Image (tube, rainbow, N blue to C red):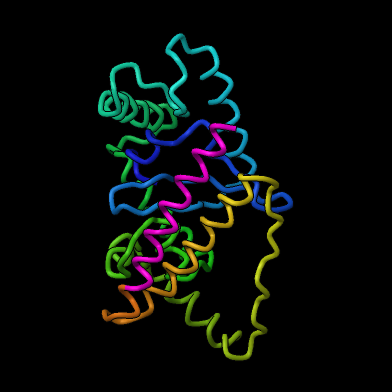
Amino acid sequence: MRIGECADLTYACLHNVGPDRWAIHVPLGKLKTERMIPVDSFVCELVQRLRFFRSFDPLPADGRLLARHKGKQTLIKQLRPYLSDAAVAVGISTAIVPHQLRHTYATEMMRAGVSLPALMTLLGHVKAEMTMKYLQVAGNDLQREFHLARSQPRHLAPQPKAPTISPRAGLDGVADALLFAQHAIEMFRRSLSDGPPRRCLDRLSNRLTKILCEARKLNQAG
């Protein structure tokens, strides 16, 4: 995720979306999109540790995972040097900025077999051209893709079944269902050319966003 999105993560950003399946809800970001990013046990443990340390913060609770002592932009300026310090600690002499991690993440996901539409959703992109700028395709990648296509053609491979998701109870489950419905609409909308159907789906997605906000307000009130 982008560093600004990281700074905006809520205290309750971690969601259980199925048996041993977890995702982080990334709020509205640079391109006015929000998404659920699958994470592993390491990230889950990291979020739990941040929650633990956040509980000792003297600042009043504001619903954020990371404390903002002097506002969002000040927090971002504080986070950037931490990455440089970590790079130096492990022996990396090249200057690194947080956005480079998105490029690395995109390339590694592509190499692991993640499809372009799925990668677009993970990165929060609305255009494939934007995602392609993040990918670094090396000669080894081309060799691997070529031989994999020759040995295991996709048109002969069995189609994967849709994952089974166990919704949470109550309004949390309603919020999860709304998020997944919104993502499904968005993925289908992107496959359409510009026209009335695409604009209609865009309006439906905006309505779902409003419904989702109201559902969260009800959850907080309860």
Q: Using residue 143 as the reference point, say whether residue 164 is left or right of it.
A: right
x, y percentage for residue 76? 30, 30
Q: Residue at x 51, y 19 (%)?
A: 54
Compared with 175, 109 (above or below) is below
Q: Quadrant of residue 208?
A: bottom left
Q: Using residue 99 as the reference point, say whether residue 212 is left or right of it.
A: right
Q: Using residue 70 as the reference point, say whether residue 156 is left or right of it.
A: right
**Camera-side residue of 131 and 205:** 205
The magenta stretch spans which residues? 200-222
Compared with 222, 38 (above or below) is below
Compared with 55, 26 (above or below) is below
Q: Quadrant of residue 60?
A: top left
Q: Residue at x 32, y 64 (%)?
A: 126
x, y percentage for residue 35? 45, 53
In the rendered image, residue 162 lying in the magenta stretch gets the answer no
Compared with 216, 35 (above or below) is below
x, y percentage for residue 163? 67, 66
**Camera-side residue of 202 and 153:** 202
Q: Residue at x 47, y 29 (%)?
A: 65
In the rendered image, residue 207 lying in the magenta stretch gets the answer yes
Hey, which residue is sitting farthest bottom in the picture? 156
Q: Using residue 182 as the reference point, say whether residue 23 is left or right of it.
A: right
